[in-house]
Amino acid sequence: MENKNEYVRGFWAEGVPFIWMSGIAALILISLIAGLLILVLASGLAQFWASDLAKISLSDGSYMLGIIEKEEKTSEQNRILVRIGNRDVNGLDFKWVEASKISKIEYPPTASVVERDEYGPMYGFITSLNVGETVVPSTNAGFENIMRAEIDAAREKGEKMKKLQLILDTDKKEITALEVRIRKLEDGENAGTPEALLQKADLEKRRVEMLEAFGTVLTSAEKEIETLRVDSDSPEIQVLLAGGEKPSLKLKKIVAIHSPNSMGVFNKSALYARNVAKFVWDWPRESNTEGGVFPAIFGTILMVFIMVITCTPLGIMTALYMNEYARHGFVLSALRLAVNNLAGVPSIVFGIFGLGFFVYIIGGNIDAMFFADKLPEPTFGTGGILWASLTLALLTVPVVVVSTIEGLSSVPRANREGALALGSSKFQMLWNVVLPNAMPGILTGIILAVSRAAGEVAPLMITGVVKLVSSLPVDSAWPYFHLDRKFMHLGFHIYDVGFQSPNVEAAKPMVYTTTALLLLIVVSLNATAIILRNKLRKKYAGSAL
Amino acid sequence: MSTMEQTVNEIDTVAVIARNVNFFYGETQALFDININIKPKQITAFIGPSGCGKSTLLRCFNRMNEVILGTKIKGDILIHGTDVYKEGTRLETLRKRVGMVFQKSNPFPMTIYDNIAFGPRMRGLKDKTKLDEIVERSLKQSDLWQEVKERLNRSAMDLSGGQQQRLCIARTLANEPEIILMDEPASALDPISTSKIEETIQELRNYYTIVIVTHNLQQAARCSDHTAFFYLGRLVEMDATARIFQNPSQKRTEDYISGKFG
């Protein structure tokens, strides 16, 4: 009896239930995180795998061709969901089929998936390749290779056309800009004055020169574009669909063709790698539900980068002042409280502030001062990547301030006194001894700031994020950095594809993949900072001796 | 002798003069009416039980107490005749003249070379050959040169505790100070490192005025020319070390030295 009491008392004194509870809490948290990761990764990464095309024969004699997405067994019914594709013909992507109506399911090796620019994938049997008058039936030997060569050629022609068109447009724009300037000189306040006339003559001369120089190029380019268009218009393939339709597809609109049922694991893996690469490097198609997310990756990383290089110095300066120079008292305490609470302000409020302050006030004034000739069309007076990044910098600066203050206070007093005793000024002490020592703390702040900023969407929606952009904020056109441009962002992409696209069910895999990618980017940005921090920590290890 | 004449006389023969120094941490008074003269190019030891104010007085000489908020000093401290608490005194210049070695070695997390060159660099010296000279001279003076000359570009944090402390002495010497204050420089070290430090101090005795605070009475007896005994914020007595340890004039000094309290 005595022993038992002892045991019970020990049980409570050692806090066994508490240890269990804390362990369970940690377990719950870890499984939540793991579950989320597994869900996102499994669903996201599965979308690049080429699923087999099933030919489902129905009891009424007709058949369907598509990918079996899932089976649903309830007491009342037993049905399967088939992705039937061919949106242009069927009007929808998915169809439920009663299991009782199915007579046979097979996987014919010739069934093909045609990826194209519009209307999502097409599932069917390719019957022939038509180039002009020549018809090559798919039963011919080596048909597949011929077809692939033709598709590549057609796409190449298309790319060439686009490039020529771009050159043509830029040249035309330059000439138009010259003409605008000439017209301004004619109608402007100083019209008729000798200087204006002189300037005008100069511009006129340049215009004539340009026209001469470009003239021949322009006409030949226009001709070439025309021939390319006629050329690439003609080759087509004919496809037999499940419903018996036999549409023709222009080759230049085809992205890729593959027959999953006849592919081995090796071929499928190769295709998988190609698909992943395409997802990362291509631009979106079909209102973002297909193609790649390259502009969104680029926008996200550039935005985080601009955010870090603006919020870090601001945060460090603020922390330095608060921790080292400001006099202790009511004002400092109030400031600390304000900084801590700033982190709790809803991000949309920062967005609204960014819109009002950066976009309308600062951007508006920049436009009035430097881009007056373009008004009323705004340059900086509208949302753009610069303003969005600065808004996020404001949002994350408290995090940097708090971590930097922690880093500064953790620098041993012995090091500060050592520097002062050697006759360094306070500034020299801070700059040469304290700041390098506080670097790990500062990097922790940057890590937290990056994590917060990369996942933030709400404030971006009103300061410069858009669904689709035609050009990146950095390109080969002078001055290379176009920070006034709108941009795409992975977080917004998830929202847009998942909830705003016309075909949510078809876009679901895309949402998972984009989420996985965003997580990957945040993790790798953080990993870089963490590796850097650990290196610095090692360097300063022992300084507390 | 008039006061004026006395002052002029003292300037020649005295490195540090403290006159009627009272020191406060906030409301608490830590030093009471301290009057002390410290002779140049000799070693003076401050002894006394913990909390007696010896470190506080030491830190008054280079105004290191000002790092702590809410401290206040009354009275004068003259270093070779200049009043260090006069308005407009540049702390950087004062601390170059009056160097300090702390209880815990506090090398910066930089290379050995950068640690030594820190002081001269802060005063704008960039000339590589001059810096090289200073580094070599300082390390030789602190007996560290033979041990580290091959690895000047390695981190100072890799050195042993005793080496780190000698590095800190070398770092102070690089400033060519007039006076070196040492705040229990060997209290955190093992006996072998301690004797090394003591040797170094002996070698410096003819070139620098050294004031050393120590808890170790044997150390004070071994190293110093003069010893001052402090108790509860007051200077009890100061005399030649031999006299203090053999024939002190005050009862309290005798009690402390013979181990009756401490």
Image (cartoon, rainbow, N blue to C red):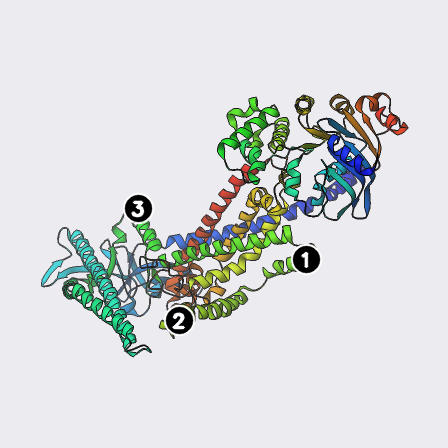
Q: Which residue is mark 2?
A: A378
Residue in the image at 82% along x and 36% along y: B35
Q: Can you identify the residue that label 1 sits on?
A: A333
Question: Type of residue at label 3?
Answer: Val
Three-letter amino acid code at disc 2?
Answer: Pro
Left or right: residue B62 compared with residue A228? right
Q: Name which of mark 2 and mark 3 comes first in the sequence.
A: 3
User: SS of the residue at dot 3?
Assistant: helix
Return the x and y of residue B165 as percentages of the image width and height.
Answer: 64, 29
Q: Position of residue B96 (x, y in %)?
A: 64, 37
Helix or strand or loop: what does disc 2 sit on? loop
Furthest residue toward right: B251
Q: Position of residue A259 (x, y in %)?
A: 25, 54
Q: Check disc 1 and give the amino acid type.
A: Ser
**Residue at the disc numbered 3:** A265
- Does the residue at mark 1 contact the one at mark 2 (Cβ under 8 Å)? no
Of mark 1 and mark 2, the one earlier in the sequence is 1
Dot 1: element: helix
Q: Nearer the viewer, residue A338 or A418?
A: A418
- Distance in Å between CA atoms under marks 1 and 2: 42 Å
Specify which label sits upstream in the sequence, 1 or 3: 3
Quadrant in the picture for the N terminus of chain A: top right
| Depth order, front residue of A280/B214 | B214
Q: Residue at x 11, y 60 (%)?
A: A135
Residue A276 in view in this figure:
yes
